[in-house]
Image (tube, helix red, strand yellow):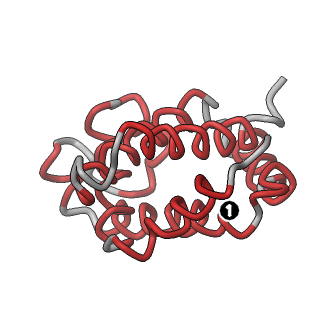
Amino acid sequence: VHWEDAEKQYIVSVFSKIDVDHVGANTLERVLIVFPWTKRYFNSFGDLSSPGAIKHNNKVSAHGRKVLAAIIECTRHFGNIKGHLANLSHLHSEKLHVDPHNFRVLGQCLRIELAAALGFKEFTPERNAYFQKFMDVISHSLGREYH
Protein backbone atom coordinates (compact mmCIF):
# COMPACT_ATOMS: atom_id res chain seq x y z
CA VAL A 1 0.00 0.00 0.00
CA HIS A 2 1.30 3.41 -0.92
CA TRP A 3 0.75 6.09 1.70
CA GLU A 4 0.81 9.77 0.86
CA ASP A 5 2.50 11.95 3.48
CA ALA A 6 -0.75 13.86 4.02
CA GLU A 7 -2.59 10.62 4.79
CA LYS A 8 -0.04 9.45 7.33
CA GLN A 9 0.30 12.85 8.97
CA TYR A 10 -3.43 13.29 9.37
CA ILE A 11 -4.03 9.78 10.70
CA VAL A 12 -1.29 10.22 13.28
CA SER A 13 -2.51 13.70 14.24
CA VAL A 14 -6.09 12.58 14.87
CA PHE A 15 -5.14 10.51 17.86
CA SER A 16 -3.74 13.58 19.62
CA LYS A 17 -7.02 15.45 19.01
CA ILE A 18 -9.42 12.98 20.60
CA ASP A 19 -10.06 11.36 23.95
CA VAL A 20 -8.66 7.96 23.02
CA ASP A 21 -10.24 6.18 25.99
CA HIS A 22 -13.67 7.59 25.19
CA VAL A 23 -13.50 6.92 21.45
CA GLY A 24 -12.10 3.42 21.98
CA ALA A 25 -14.86 2.49 24.41
CA ASN A 26 -17.58 4.06 22.27
CA THR A 27 -16.34 2.29 19.16
CA LEU A 28 -16.61 -1.17 20.66
CA GLU A 29 -19.93 -0.28 22.30
CA ARG A 30 -21.24 0.77 18.88
CA VAL A 31 -20.04 -2.49 17.31
CA LEU A 32 -21.82 -4.57 19.94
CA ILE A 33 -25.05 -2.56 19.85
CA VAL A 34 -25.41 -2.05 16.09
CA PHE A 35 -24.09 -5.47 15.11
CA PRO A 36 -25.43 -7.70 17.89
CA TRP A 37 -24.02 -10.93 16.43
CA THR A 38 -20.56 -9.67 17.43
CA LYS A 39 -21.48 -10.21 21.10
CA ARG A 40 -20.80 -13.93 20.71
CA TYR A 41 -17.06 -13.23 20.90
CA PHE A 42 -17.41 -11.57 24.29
CA ASN A 43 -19.23 -14.16 26.39
CA SER A 44 -16.78 -13.65 29.24
CA PHE A 45 -17.66 -9.95 29.49
CA GLY A 46 -20.85 -10.49 31.48
CA ASP A 47 -24.12 -8.72 30.76
CA LEU A 48 -24.38 -7.54 27.16
CA SER A 49 -28.16 -7.90 26.99
CA SER A 50 -29.03 -4.29 26.18
CA PRO A 51 -27.44 -1.07 24.97
CA GLY A 52 -27.43 0.21 28.54
CA ALA A 53 -25.72 -2.91 29.84
CA ILE A 54 -23.09 -2.66 27.10
CA LYS A 55 -22.45 1.04 27.77
CA HIS A 56 -21.96 0.39 31.48
CA ASN A 57 -19.81 -2.71 31.07
CA ASN A 58 -16.26 -2.03 32.26
CA LYS A 59 -14.85 -4.96 30.30
CA VAL A 60 -16.28 -3.57 27.07
CA SER A 61 -14.78 -0.15 27.78
CA ALA A 62 -11.39 -1.61 28.66
CA HIS A 63 -11.30 -3.81 25.59
CA GLY A 64 -12.36 -0.90 23.37
CA ARG A 65 -9.43 1.12 24.71
CA LYS A 66 -7.12 -1.85 24.11
CA VAL A 67 -8.33 -2.25 20.52
CA LEU A 68 -7.88 1.44 19.77
CA ALA A 69 -4.40 1.35 21.31
CA ALA A 70 -3.51 -1.47 18.90
CA ILE A 71 -4.88 0.58 16.00
CA ILE A 72 -2.86 3.60 17.09
CA GLU A 73 0.25 1.42 17.29
CA CYS A 74 -0.24 0.64 13.59
CA THR A 75 0.59 4.29 12.85
CA ARG A 76 4.19 3.42 13.77
CA HIS A 77 4.20 0.69 11.13
CA PHE A 78 2.72 2.22 7.98
CA GLY A 79 5.34 0.41 5.93
CA ASN A 80 4.44 -3.02 7.30
CA ILE A 81 1.05 -3.06 9.00
CA LYS A 82 0.48 -6.62 7.79
CA GLY A 83 3.67 -7.83 9.43
CA HIS A 84 3.00 -5.84 12.56
CA LEU A 85 -0.43 -7.45 12.96
CA ALA A 86 0.64 -11.00 12.07
CA ASN A 87 0.35 -12.31 15.64
CA LEU A 88 -3.04 -10.68 16.18
CA SER A 89 -4.22 -12.07 12.87
CA HIS A 90 -3.21 -15.55 13.92
CA LEU A 91 -4.87 -15.16 17.33
CA HIS A 92 -8.15 -13.92 15.87
CA SER A 93 -8.32 -16.57 13.16
CA GLU A 94 -6.96 -19.68 14.85
CA LYS A 95 -7.87 -19.25 18.51
CA LEU A 96 -10.77 -16.81 18.68
CA HIS A 97 -12.33 -17.67 15.28
CA VAL A 98 -13.52 -14.11 14.73
CA ASP A 99 -15.38 -13.56 11.47
CA PRO A 100 -13.02 -11.30 9.47
CA HIS A 101 -15.98 -9.18 8.36
CA ASN A 102 -16.11 -7.88 11.92
CA PHE A 103 -12.81 -6.07 11.41
CA ARG A 104 -14.47 -3.99 8.68
CA VAL A 105 -17.43 -3.37 10.99
CA LEU A 106 -15.01 -2.11 13.63
CA GLY A 107 -13.46 0.26 11.10
CA GLN A 108 -16.86 1.63 10.13
CA CYS A 109 -17.76 2.24 13.76
CA LEU A 110 -14.42 3.89 14.46
CA ARG A 111 -14.90 6.31 11.58
CA ILE A 112 -18.36 7.21 12.91
CA GLU A 113 -16.91 7.87 16.36
CA LEU A 114 -14.08 9.95 14.91
CA ALA A 115 -16.55 12.01 12.90
CA ALA A 116 -18.60 12.59 16.05
CA ALA A 117 -15.54 13.53 18.08
CA LEU A 118 -13.92 15.79 15.48
CA GLY A 119 -16.88 17.29 13.65
CA PHE A 120 -17.46 17.59 9.93
CA LYS A 121 -15.18 20.60 9.46
CA GLU A 122 -12.22 18.60 10.74
CA PHE A 123 -13.19 15.11 9.59
CA THR A 124 -13.88 15.99 5.97
CA PRO A 125 -14.86 13.40 3.35
CA GLU A 126 -11.25 13.38 2.13
CA ARG A 127 -9.91 12.72 5.62
CA ASN A 128 -12.60 10.13 6.21
CA ALA A 129 -11.22 8.40 3.11
CA TYR A 130 -7.75 8.39 4.70
CA PHE A 131 -9.18 6.53 7.67
CA GLN A 132 -11.15 4.17 5.49
CA LYS A 133 -7.93 3.26 3.69
CA PHE A 134 -6.10 2.86 7.02
CA MET A 135 -8.82 0.66 8.49
CA ASP A 136 -9.12 -1.35 5.26
CA VAL A 137 -5.40 -2.13 5.48
CA ILE A 138 -5.79 -3.12 9.13
CA SER A 139 -8.86 -5.25 8.36
CA HIS A 140 -7.11 -6.98 5.50
CA SER A 141 -4.03 -7.56 7.64
CA LEU A 142 -6.05 -9.03 10.50
CA GLY A 143 -7.92 -11.28 8.09
CA ARG A 144 -4.89 -12.62 6.28
CA GLU A 145 -4.70 -15.86 8.29
CA TYR A 146 -8.17 -16.91 7.15
CA HIS A 147 -8.51 -19.44 4.37
Identify the residue at the far left of this view: 52
Within the image, what quadrant is residue 57 found in? Answer: bottom left
Residue 21 spot, x, y in % from top left: 35, 73
Quarter of the figure that contains the N terminus: top right
The one nearer the camera, 41 or 12, is 12
Up-down relation of residue 101 to residue 136 (above or below) = above
Residue at x 45%, y 70% (from the top left corner): 15
* Residue depicted at x 24% and y 51%: 121
* Foreground pick, 8 / 24: 8
Circle count: 1
- Residue underneath mark 1: 74
Residue at image coords 67%, 58%:
5
User: Measured from the top left, where is residue 137 in percent x and y?
Assistant: 69, 41
Where residue 45 appears, as percent x and y from the top left, is 39, 57
User: Residue at the location (83% across, 52% down)?
Assistant: 86
Please, is residue 95 above or below residue 36 in the view? below
* Left or right of 82, for residue 62: left
Left/right of residue 99 with respect to residue 52 in the rendered view: right
Where does the image place residue 46, in percent across and percent down from the top left? 33, 56
